[in-house]
Image (cartoon, rainbow, N blue to C red):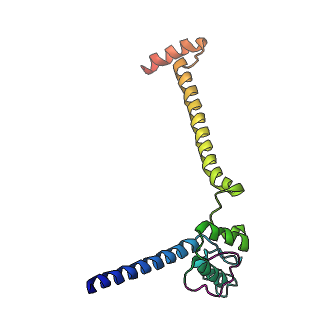
């Protein structure tokens, strides 16, 4: 019975530590998707080393509060329950600090074009390059198969050059 109690206590402790680790990992992951909005540095929120930064400390406290990790108890995050999903946290930062506060664009609405246009433009550019190169090769092949257009009046001169050079 004592052994069963120890195993139960150990499993509860492990489960609690696993939950803390995932929350800290979530905090780190989200902190690297948000930019510091002070306007003087261009760092990610958790990497901002701007001395006297007016925004990063407050934003980090808000992120702590939104992810449910330690350190965000005094942050004002009105309208957001702690530990909401990642997209809701990022949307909260977009609404509170501006759309440019979040590094990656949303995957809906007009911001969806930011995900679609770069690969589409790259694909269309590659397709255009392939088509142009094929056209060039086709024209070169046609020109080679037709042979050079020789002037018939120059044939006696060519024969003389071959005789003199023994080619």
Q: Quadrant of residue 68?
A: bottom right
The majority secondary structure of the magenta stretch comes to: loop
> Looking at the image, which residue is at 65% across and 50% down?
117
Would you say 130 lies left or right of 117 here?
A: left
The residues colored magenta run: 70-81
Q: How far from the left and from the top, in percent, is residue 129?
A: 59, 39
Relative image position of residue 131 (x, y in whole percent): 59, 34
Viewer-nearest residue: 148 or 112: 112
Q: Quadrant of the C terminus?
A: top left
The question of residue 72 being in magenta is answered with yes
Task: Name the residue furthest front.
Answer: 1
> Quarter-wise, where is residue 90 in the image?
bottom right
Q: Quick check: 105 above or below 68?
A: above
Q: Which residue occupies 61% across, 84% down?
A: 72
Q: Residue at x 72, y 70 (%)?
A: 95
Let me know if residue 156 is in the magenta part. no
Residue drawn 51% across the image and 76% down it: 23
Q: Position of residue 127 (x, y in %)?
A: 59, 39
Return the residue nearer the eye: 26 or 149. 26
On-image quarter of the N terminus:
bottom left
147 left or right of 12 in image: right
* Nearer to the camera, 76 or 146: 76
């Amino acid at each position: 019975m004592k052994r069963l109690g120890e195993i139960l206590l150990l499993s509860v402790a492990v489960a609690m530590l696993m939950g803390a680790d995932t929350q800290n990992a979530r905090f780190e992951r989200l902190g690297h998707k948000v930019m510091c909005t002070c306007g003087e540095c261009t760092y990610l929120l958790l990497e901002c080393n701007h001395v006297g930064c007016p925004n990063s400390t407050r934003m980090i406290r808000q992120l702590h509060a939104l992810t449910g990790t330690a350190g965000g108890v005094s942050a004002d995050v009105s309208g957001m329950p702690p530990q909401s999903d990642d997209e809701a946290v990022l949307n909260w930062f977009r609404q509170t600090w501006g759309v440019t506060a979040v590094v990656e664009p949303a995957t809906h609405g007009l911001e969806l074009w930011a995900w679609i246009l770069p690969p589409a433009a790259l694909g269309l550019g590659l397709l255009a390059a392939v088509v142009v190169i094929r056209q060039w090769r086709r024209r070169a092949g046609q020109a080679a198969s037709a042979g050079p257009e020789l002037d018939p009046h120059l044939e006696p001169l060519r024969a003389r050059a071959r005789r003199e050079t023994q080619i």
